[in-house]
Amino acid sequence: MPTWFINEMFHESNSPSAVSSADWSSSDEYAHLGAPTQALRYSGEPRVIGKFDVDDLIDQAREAGGVIEILSAVGDTVLDDTRLLHVFGGTAPLSEAKLLAAIHLTPQRTFEQDPKYPIRLLVDIAIKALSPAINDPTTAVQAIDEIEDLLRRLGRRELDVGLAKDEKGALRLIIPMPTWEDYLRLAFDEIRQYGGTSVQVMRRLRSALGGIAEVVTSETRLKSVERYLKQLDLVIDRSPLDTEDRWVASQEDRQGLGLSRKRQPAKGHASLRGRIGPTDREALAGTTARR
């Protein structure tokens, strides 16, 4: 799976508490922009937003002395009369033709500014493999391998790049961007739901989440990963698997089934290292009683 687009889009993360464009849109500073002075709507056949010419949009906003807010994200399908953007302030209306030219519309999604798209494709492969008609958990595990690699790279990057300023530090462009939680939800929710009765998939998911926890650079992101591990525990506890299988499903295994691993405690991440969850305790208690 190509990963060059992640390096080009996102810098290494150095500010764990950075404000995302999603959070900023509900702030007082956003309210101070006032009402939009201009709006741009799409007219035509359905198209997908492939990428934005960020530098061009910043230049247009600076020249007009305003702020452009993009309303549709990369990867969104725009339909006839879809609102594309708002302009706040400015000395004169911006050229709609120039604005539209800076929004690249394509017949289908692309990787260039859309790291969600390769994750979406990999998740589709995994959940299709987990369907009753196919029942191929090994293919799902191989898809999780690639998903983990993408999440490891994204977890070390500054994802909150939706607020762009000009060379003088003035805000000029607001673009909706996915949060870390959005990436986790996209990557793991459906696989967890469809793979809840597969010991192999549960073990690989736990290993993936543990591996991601090792490389994330933000405590907030780490806590999100911890929440996903707890959800994984709940899925296993509520599954129709018997006690022994639930215990096996609660182990980490990068191969799915092949080599169980126990993590050693690591500074700052103790809750994710070598922990015994409720399913483990129950299984161990049952094993001891049988002996």
Image: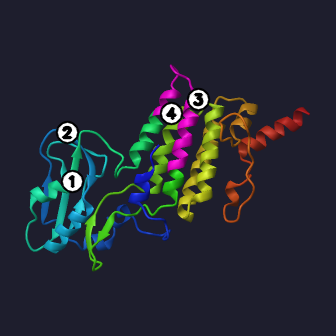
Which residue type does callout 1 highlight? Ile
Q: CA distance from mark 3 to mark 4?
A: 8 Å
Which residue type does callout 4 highlight? Ala
**Above-or-below relation of 235 to 58:** above
Q: CA distance from mark 1 to mark 2?
A: 14 Å
- Looking at the picture, the colour scheme in use is rainbow
Disc 1 or disc 2, which is closer to the eye? 1
Q: Tell me which numbered mark, 1 or 3, is placed earlier along the sequence.
A: 1
Residue at the outermost top position: 133
Q: CA distance from mark 2 to mark 3?
A: 35 Å
- Local crowd at mark 2 within 10 Å, few (<14), some, or many (≥20)? some
In the drawing, does residue 228 fall left or right of residue 243? Answer: left
The image quadrant of residue 63 is bottom left
**x%, y% of residue 13?**
49, 66
In the drawing, does residue 2 fall left or right of residue 234? Answer: left
Which residue type does callout 2 highlight? Pro
The residue at the point 72 percent across, 31 percent down is 245
Q: CA distance from mark 4 to mark 2?
A: 28 Å
> Which residue in the structure is indicated by mark 1?
103
The residue at the point 74 percent across, 58 percent down is 265
The secondary structure that dominates the magenta segment is helix
**x%, y% of residue 186?**
45, 45
> Which residue in the structure is indicated by mark 2?
46
The image quadrant of residue 258 is top right
Q: Tell me which numbered mark, 4 or 2, is placed earlier along the sequence.
A: 2
Q: Looking at the rendered structure, which numbered label has been put on residue 126?
A: 4
> Which residue in the structure is indicated by mark 3?
137
Callout 3: SS: helix
Q: Tell me which numbered mark, 2 or 3, is placed earlier along the sequence.
A: 2
